[in-house]
Image (cartoon, grey):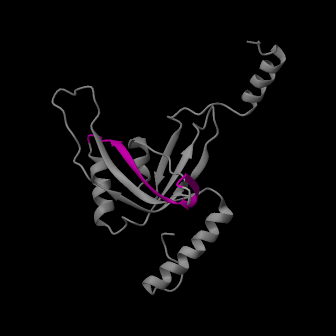
């Protein structure tokens, strides 16, 4: 087994440091448009991504192989909030469910802590829908455990590339206007 020359190791370290600081998993947050205060109650969530799968198929000789699948913008993720004494999370979730805004939420994801690592937009989730599938769990012995309110967040994610997002938003405006018979801009896109 040969040792890696010191010069190579030095160059790797310099290159790695030049790529920037490592992000901590706590260096991310989300903002729900119209419900910005929930940002401060967020405990855990997944960052949205464009997903792509594969198409598996068999050849005439019986060998399995694959081809590229289509990009998927739909995301489904768990989102947990720490509840407060004022029941802010419960009230906000109920407001979203009963106000007609559910299914039209815009959620933006950010990474970076603003101090050590500059904050950058990760991207946005459009047509966001919050589904409450379970009641918050309580525990008589959990005096040191925060009460969490977990929901499932559904929506379509588009990377933070303005030229792509603007053209997709234009298409979304046309489709929504055609389907709803409304003329002009759709207010939540």
- Residue found at the very far left of the displayed protein: 140
Residue 88, position as x, y percentages in the image: 30, 48
Whether 116 is drawn above or below 82: the answer is above
Q: Which residues are magenta?
A: 62-85
Residue at 66% over, 61% down: 162
Residue 40, position as x, y percentages in the image: 42, 43
In the rendered view, does 14 fall on the left or right side of 24?
right
Whether 128 is drawn above or below 80: the answer is below
In the rendered view, does 187 fall on the left or right side of 170?
left
Q: Does the magenta run of residues contain 66? A: yes
Whether 33 is drawn above or below 151: the answer is below
- Name the image quarter holding residue 167: bottom right
In the rendered view, does 160 fall on the left or right side of 140?
right
Which of the two residues, 13 or 177, is positioned nearer the viewer here?
A: 13
Tell me the quadrant of the picture where the N terminus can be found: top right
Residue at 32% over, 67% down: 99
Q: Does the magenta run of residues contain 87? A: no
């Amino acid at each position: 087994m040969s040792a890696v020359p010191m010069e190579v190791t030095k160059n790797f370290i310099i290159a790695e440091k030049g790529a920037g600081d490592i992000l901590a998993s706590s260096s991310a947050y989300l903002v729900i448009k119209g419900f910005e205060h929930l940002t401060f109650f967020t405990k855990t969530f997944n960052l949205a991504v464009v997903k792509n799968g594969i198409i598996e198929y068999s050849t005439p000789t019986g060998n399995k192989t694959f081809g590229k699948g289509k990009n998927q913008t739909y995301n489904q993720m768990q989102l947990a909030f720490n509840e407060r004494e004022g029941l802010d999370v419960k009230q906000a979730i109920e407001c979203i469910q009963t106000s007609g805004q559910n299914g039209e939420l815009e959620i933006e994801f950010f990474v970076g802590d603003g101090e050590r690592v500059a904050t950058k937009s990760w991207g946005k989730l459009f047509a966001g829908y919050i589904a409450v599938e379970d009641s918050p769990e309580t525990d008589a012995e959990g005096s040191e455990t925060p009460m969490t309110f977990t929901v499932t967040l559904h929506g379509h994610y588009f990377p933070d590339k303005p030229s792509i997002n603007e053209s997709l938003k234009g298409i979304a405006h046309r489709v929504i206007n055609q389907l709803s018979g409304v003329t002009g801009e759709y207010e939540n896109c």
